[in-house]
Image (cartoon, rainbow, N blue to C red):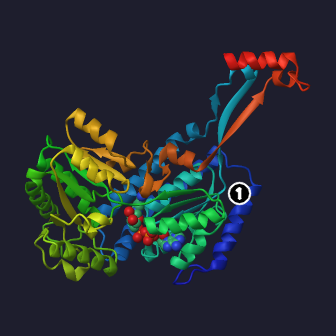
Amino acid sequence: MIPTSSGMSQDALRTIFALQQAASRSQQAPAFERRREAIEKLCELVRTNATEIASAISTDFGGRSKSETELLEIVPTLSALRHARRHLRSWMRPERRPVDFAFQPARAWVQYEPLGVIGIVAPWNYPLLLTISPLLDAIAAGNRAMLKPSELTPRFSELLRVMIAERYDCSEIAVITGGVQIARSFASMPFDHLLFTGSAAVGRQVMRAAAENLTPVTLELGGKSPAIVCPDYPVEKAARSIAFGKFLNAGQTCIAPDYALVPYERCEAFAHRVLWEATRAYPDIAGNPDYTSIITEQHRIRLKAALDEARAAGATVLSHPDANADSEGKLVPTVVLGAPVDGGLLREEIFGPILPVVPYRSLDEALAFINTRPRPLALYCFTHDRQMRALVLARATSGGVTLNGTLLHIAQDALPFGGVGASGMGAYHGRDGFRRMSHTRAVHQIGFLNLFEHLGPPWGKLSSTVARFLSRR
Ligand code: NAD
């Protein structure tokens, strides 16, 4: 089971899966104390290795801001761990459910039981948060888990493998490293649940592979998350929030505002203000450790091609003035006015530091723009007007929403996080994650008398009288 530089072998994957599955079938669900201990160990793992984690991720990115790793990965991961530690006992409690008069005397309840072995496939953009957060939900619910981090973050993935192997037996938690081939085999294992975070294209393949085993899936995908600036909201304030959400991690955030819908007459002022905010936050791009690089040259080429296409179609491209950023694998913050509606920038998820600004003349028009596209993972709405807010919430569906800001709904441990439609299925985090990774088992306990058994067969007058009474109630 020694990992090679290209990752683990198929044999190691199968052996670990078999170990976990056998253990999950032969051993009782872990008690509260054992689960809390497993969570404690995760807390210690993150806390004591924070510096190494940030440096491995930075190396993988070719430059990822240390503060971003701290604030967007380490802090929310520790917060989720503490939240689970605090609430686990109450989440695990069975819940009494009412029993209808016709079935008395009896008691009914649901109890949350482990599913067994959970598979977790993670992307590269927040490699710590997107492995540990689903892992936390899996172990809080008493499961065993296997993690497959991204091949695009090889240093972090190897560090994670070692940190987990030092603390947990591989029959409990194991990290499987490797590329697409091992990822494919991973998705074809008969897990009891598979949580995949990544692109919609790979999500489809994962769901197909899972269907062969009737493995239920949670798919955390991406998409084009819109930000609507309503006419009453100060453009400067909206620009600050949107620039903040867009340029963190150089736009490589699943819930980054993908594009902004802005009243027609305020588009230009808004676009310049977003760029002003970007320049204030990142005066230089080249040599600036606060500004993150694009993960691979291939992604940079894809983003530049989308910009060239927009430029060729007559769009106005406003870019951060630092022209030296190119040499460092970075892409400068860019705002685009007049991007073609059928072009790459407004068709595909951008996943980079480019913000197209789309003009609208009425809120109806803005909502129609959103609703003719696949359902987004996040929605941002900037308004102080209650009616406008209610209209946007009622008419535009999304996985989650932050009002008058960006990104922060993901950081709320008490809120579920997930997509809808093309942006994913199923949500996790906190109690919702605990339940997602549990089997909600129905239990009905009959009291001293079971009236139903006394009605027949043979069926007679008593049964028809009771049936008539029960159906008329
Ligand atoms: P990706 O789909 O290319 O890869 C994700 C993971 O899937 C990697 O670990 C990879 O090894 C694995 N994989 C690749 N091919 C596979 C296959 N055939 N079967 C099983 N697994 C396979 O995604 P990415 O480029 O790493 O991440 C970017 C995407 O992820 C964006 O679309 C983004 O919006 C999305 N994302 C979503 C969330 C969310 O929480 N909803 C969070 C972060 C990123």
Amino acid residing under circle 1: Ser
Q: Nearer the viewer, residue 473 or 384?
A: 473
Total number of numbered labels? Answer: 1
Q: In the picture, residue 307 is in which quadrant? A: bottom left
Q: Is the residue marked by circle 1 packed among few (<14), some (14-19), or many (20+) residues within 10 Å?
A: many
Tell me: residue 200, above or below residue 311: above
Name the residue: 15% across, 80% down.
324
The vertical placement of 425 against 201, above or below, is above
Q: Is residue 329 left or right of residue 146?
A: left
Q: Position of residue 227 (x, y in %)?
A: 25, 52
CB at disc 1 and ligand 1 closer than 8 Å: no
Q: Residue placed at 38% from the left, 53% from the top?
A: 375
Would residue 112 be found to the left or right of residue 365 on screen? right
**Looking at the rendering, in which quadrant would you find the C terminus?**
top right
Residue at the (13%, 71%) spot, across then down: 314
Residue 452, compared with residue 245, is above or below; it is: above
Task: Using the rendered image of the protein, determine whether residue 276 is visible from the camera's viewpoint.
Answer: yes
Residue at 43% of width from left, 42% of height from top? Answer: 414
Residue 83's x, y, as percent?
A: 46, 44
Question: Can you give x and y, in whole percent of width and height, for residue 210 in the image?
Answer: 60, 64
Image coords of residue 25 (percent x, y): 74, 56
Q: Tell me if I can see residue 169 in this picture.
A: no
Q: Quadrant of ligand 1?
A: bottom left
Image check: 125 left or right of 319? right
Q: Which residue position is annotated with label 1?
A: 24
Residue 11 occupies quadrant: bottom right
- Give whichever of 140, 256 is nearer the camera: 256
Residue 401 appears left or right of 190? left
